[in-house]
Amino acid sequence: MEIKEAIYKRRSIRKFKEQKIDEKIIEELLHLAMAAPSAVNARPWEFYVIENPSVLNQFYLTFQSMHYHAPLAIVVCANELNMYHKAKNYWIQDCSAAIENILLGALSFSLGSVWCGITPQADKVAQVKKILSLGDNIIPLGLVYLGYPDEEKEPRDQYDESKVCYIK
């Protein structure tokens, strides 16, 4: 699949089969995530891979609007101790790029995915930190649910010329 096709085909999937994802695929997704660009190569990210049904259920009970009964979730966080002082404020971009790599990588393994935001919602940040027992230096940015899709969506191009301004 060419990159252009993958970008158009990548859609938020919210219905998943119960089929477990092979550990080798999970590891490859993490490799892809860590191949993302990062300001001054600081790589502030940390990844919490959750397959435990009781922890996934805690997310469901806490965030009923953002749980899709997927067999796996990856919470992408930043560790403040890994933030290079000159790039400290770029952790959101760094972790977002890692998440996008996970989403596109999932597609290459015929997996569905949906990205649920955590930061900047202070209540969600606090709840995720509590569920995962994260230290004060760890900031959760987003949660990615992954699984074999139990729904299909058409590829789409959302180009809107009115949102483009050429300066020549």
Image (spheres, helix red, strand yellow):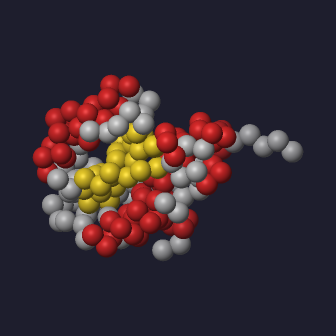
Residue 40's spot in the image, x, y percent? 65, 51
Residue 1's spot in the image, x, y percent? 48, 74
- Position of 46 relative to 81 (above/below): below
Is residue 64 rendered to the left or right of residue 100? left
Q: Residue at x 46, y 43 (%)?
A: 78
Quarter residue 122 falls in: top left
- Position of 136 relative to 156 (above/below): above
Q: Of 26 and 44, which appears nearest the observer?
A: 44
Total count of labels:
0
Residue 65's spot in the image, x, y percent? 25, 35
Give the quarter of the figure containing the C terminus.
top right
Q: Residue at x 17, y 65 (%)?
A: 19
Res 156 visible: no
Res 40 visible: yes
Is residue 54 rendered to the left or right of residue 154? left
Q: Of 139 and 154, which appears nearest the observer?
A: 139
Residue 15's spot in the image, x, y percent? 23, 53
Most distant residue in the top direction: 123
Q: Of 16 and 124, which appears nearest the observer?
A: 124
Q: Residue at x 24, y 67 (%)?
A: 21
Most distant residue in the right direction: 168
Is residue 107 rendered to the left or right of residue 4? left
